[in-house]
């Protein structure tokens, strides 16, 4: 058995092969002009640390082909799979080279005939019993064979190609029900893909025949292959730990970002139909430390620490600038910022990058902002061992902003966070004496209000039904709940139960509210003493989930929200005059409970 590693000689041969078939990606100069300098600066941090703290390894992307028990594997699948995977391997190598990191790519294990080693798995059930959401089930069925081959799937990166497509060569029709998603880190990952007999890099150039795709309609065989082979490259990116993102305006000359819509444009340039797909510098920067790409790995997993100080996020004309001082262990060799406008998940997030100086200083900015929309700024620190950090001692590195129709960013929530920074750090460290001192320094009214609520850690003793005063309105969080259950971490009131603390949603920070990660239920005794409950619901900033909020009175539904997604705020106002027992129910939608950080915000009882 032989193997391919990412050495320069092989990549030169691979690029020569692609060029000979009209498939090489052109090396386009950029303004992007900072890319060579940033790549060199990042490498100057990465390479010495890796030489001293890691060791050379032989790691591969392991390939599994899965078929239901009543189906044979797709025709010629080993030869086709070899062509497709080596094509994608060469694409990544060319893109890493263009971005200044040399021709690095993932390794593939080859047999004596030069073909990719494939682990073939027959499912326990027939074709009819599998569907797109069967990914976890299929993976579990693949694990015994992988273990027998000495592959620990929890410590390796695997791609499972599922034979769950239906291709009619005579009628030229295609449809599939294969899982098609992925996830992973620098330590391990899994990508679920599909295979079908007509998928072959040899077909990328073909404008004919035309076929009928069940999802994309009438398209050419070449475009069909661009979509699904590009989809393979895209999902592998997720298995390597890459999030979605789109091209910045200055990158648009390169084509479509692979981790954005580039999964549908892969090598479309060979048909004269566009510029094709490319890998953004932000993502090449992330892959530069990935063991599959650099061929080195820490003997034992390092504990990751991160310190972020003097962070300043400012609006400058039509841009947002970010600067600060960042230190980490293992050392931070890069900072990536994603500017993600609301809607379209994170596919339309643009990126900006910075390489810290020797003392940890960094600065970056972006003008790629969407007018008239809310957005989320996410900062990610890249560690030299391949790990990433998106939070630090003071909380998550995610921030809400708004861009006016004139394109001017407004940073009210970010400014409040920055003002509260020292106070929040003291709270997180449990230093209440220092927290009090920092609270007394605050001059901004909103920040004072939030700090006063957070500083008061005395739990309420009365239920709403036990209220004896004459207050006409009061926050629901001023009262003790009969019971509180949440789907993740522990119940929390007027704060999040993690280092980010603040109840932030859609660019607004709320002083009072209830943390309710779905599935959650909070029960209060009202004793028919109150007339109305009003407030808002949403998801914590940075959450990508979707939930449904429901208010019940004595078991009867009084109000129910539509599905609430990230960066949405929904108001409610409910008559509770005849209610003895109030239930606030937070439920996951059909996409499951992942990132379902539901919030009941400013819930106020009145009478």
Image (spheres, rainbow, N blue to C red):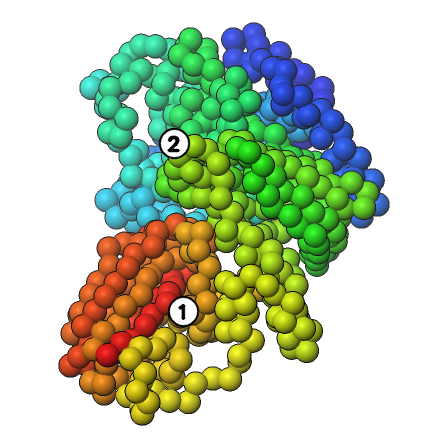
**Residue 65, which numbered label?**
none
According to the image, label 2 marks what residue? 195
Quadrant housing residue 435: bottom right
Q: Secondary structure at mark 1?
A: strand
**Residue 513, which numbered label?**
1
Vertical arrangement, residue 302 with respect to residue 369, above or below: below
Tell me what residue is drawn at x 54 percent, y 67 percent: 448
Q: Residue 595: x, y in percent?
A: 43, 56
Pair 1/2: label in front: 1
Q: Residue 469: x, y in percent?
A: 33, 89
Q: Residue 505: x, y in percent?
A: 42, 56
Tell me what residue is drawn at x 59 percent, y 43 percent: 314
Q: Which of 300 and 199 lies nearest the eye of the viewer?
A: 300
Q: Which of 326 and 9 lies nearest the eye of the viewer?
A: 326
Tell me what residue is drawn at x 27 percent, y 76 percent: 606
Whether residue 162 is visible to the viewer of this picture, yes or no, is no
Q: Which of 211 and 121 lies nearest the eye of the viewer?
A: 211
Q: The N terminus lies in which quarter of the figure?
A: top right
Q: Residue 585: x, y in percent?
A: 29, 69
Quadrant housing residue 292: top right
Whether residue 325 is visible to the viewer of this picture, yes or no, is yes
Q: Secondary structure at mark 2?
A: loop
Vertical arrangement, residue 142 with respect to residue 104, above or below: below
Label 2 Cα neighbours within 10 Å, binned few <14 / some 14-19 / many ≥20: many
Q: CA distance from mark 1 to mark 2?
A: 48 Å
Q: The C terminus lies in which quarter of the figure?
A: bottom left
Q: Earlier in the sequence, mark 1 or mark 2?
A: 2
């Amino acid at each position: 058995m032989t193997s391919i590693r990412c050495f320069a000689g092989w990549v030169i041969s691979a690029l020569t092969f692609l060029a000979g078939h009209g498939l090489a990606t052109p090396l386009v100069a950029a303004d992007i002009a900072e890319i060579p300098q940033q790549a060199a600066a990042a490498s100057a941090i990465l390479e010495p640390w890796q030489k001293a703290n890691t060791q050379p390894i032989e790691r591969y992307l392991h390939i599994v082909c899965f078929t239901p028990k009543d189906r044979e594997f797709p025709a010629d699948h080993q030869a086709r799979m070899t062509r497709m995977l080596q094509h994608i391997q060469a694409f990544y190598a060319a893109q890493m080279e263009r971005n200044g990191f040399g021709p690095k790519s993932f390794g593939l294990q080859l047999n004596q005939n030069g073909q990719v080693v494939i682990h073939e798995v027959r499912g326990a059930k027939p074709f009819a019993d599998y569907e797109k959401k069967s990914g976890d089930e299929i993976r579990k069925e693949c694990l015994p064979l992988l273990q027998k081959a000495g592959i620990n799937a929890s410590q390796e990166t695997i791609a499972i190609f599922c034979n769950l497509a239906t291709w009619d060569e005579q009628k030229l029709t295609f449809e599939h029900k294969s899982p098609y998603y992925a996830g992973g880190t620098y330590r391990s990952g899994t990508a679920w893909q599909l295979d079908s007999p007509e998928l072959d890099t040899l077909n990328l150039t073909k404008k004919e025949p035309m076929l009928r795709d069940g999802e994309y309609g009438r398209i050419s065989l070449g475009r069909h292959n661009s979509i699904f082979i590009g989809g393979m490259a895209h999902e592998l990116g997720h298995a390597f730990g890459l999030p979605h993102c789109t091209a910045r305006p200055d990158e648009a000359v390169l084509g479509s970002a692979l981790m954005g819509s580039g999964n549908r444009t892969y090598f479309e340039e060979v048909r004269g139909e566009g510029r094709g797909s490319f890998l953004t510098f932000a993502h090449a920067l992330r892959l530069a430390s990935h063991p599959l790409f650099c061929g080195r790995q820490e003997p034992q997993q390092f504990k990751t620490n991160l310190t972020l100080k003097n962070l300043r996020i400012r609006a400058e004309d039509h841009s947002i600038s970010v600067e600060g001082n960042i230190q980490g262990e293992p050392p931070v060799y890069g900072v990536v910022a994603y500017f993600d406008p609301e809607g379209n998940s994170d596919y339309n997030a643009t990126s900006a990058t910075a390489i810290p100086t020797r003392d940890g200083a960094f600065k970056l900015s972006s003008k790629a902002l969407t007018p008239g929309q809310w957005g989320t700024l996410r900062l990610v620190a890249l560690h030299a061992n391949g790990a990433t950090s998106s939070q630090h001692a003071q909380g998550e590195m995610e921030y809400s902003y708004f861009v006016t129709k004139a394109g001017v960013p407004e940073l009210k929530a970010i400014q409040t966070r920055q003002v509260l920074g020292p106070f929040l750090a003291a709270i997180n460290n449990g230093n209440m004496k220092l927290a009090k001192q920092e609270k007394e320094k605050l001059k901004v009214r909103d920040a004072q209000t939030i700090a006063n609520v957070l500083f008061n850690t005395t739990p309420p003793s009365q239920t709403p039904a036990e209220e004896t005063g004459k207050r006409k309105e009061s926050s629901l969080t001023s009262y003790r709940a009969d019971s509180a259950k949440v789907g993740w971490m522990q119940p929390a009131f007027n704060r999040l139960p993690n280092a980010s603390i603040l109840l932030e949603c859609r660019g607004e920070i709320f002083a009072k509210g209830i943390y309710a990660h779905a599935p959650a239920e909070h029960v209060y005794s009202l004793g028919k003493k109150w007339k109305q409950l009003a407030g808002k619901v949403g998801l914590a900033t940075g959450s990508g989930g979707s939930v449904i909020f429901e208010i019940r009175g004595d078991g009867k539904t009084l109000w129910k929200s539509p599905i609430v997604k990230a960066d949405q705020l929904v108001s409610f106002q409910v008559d509770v005059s005849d209610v003895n027992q109030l239930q606030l129910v937070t439920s996951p939608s059909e996409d499951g409970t992942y990132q379902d950080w539901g919030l009941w915000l400013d819930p106020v009882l009145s009478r």
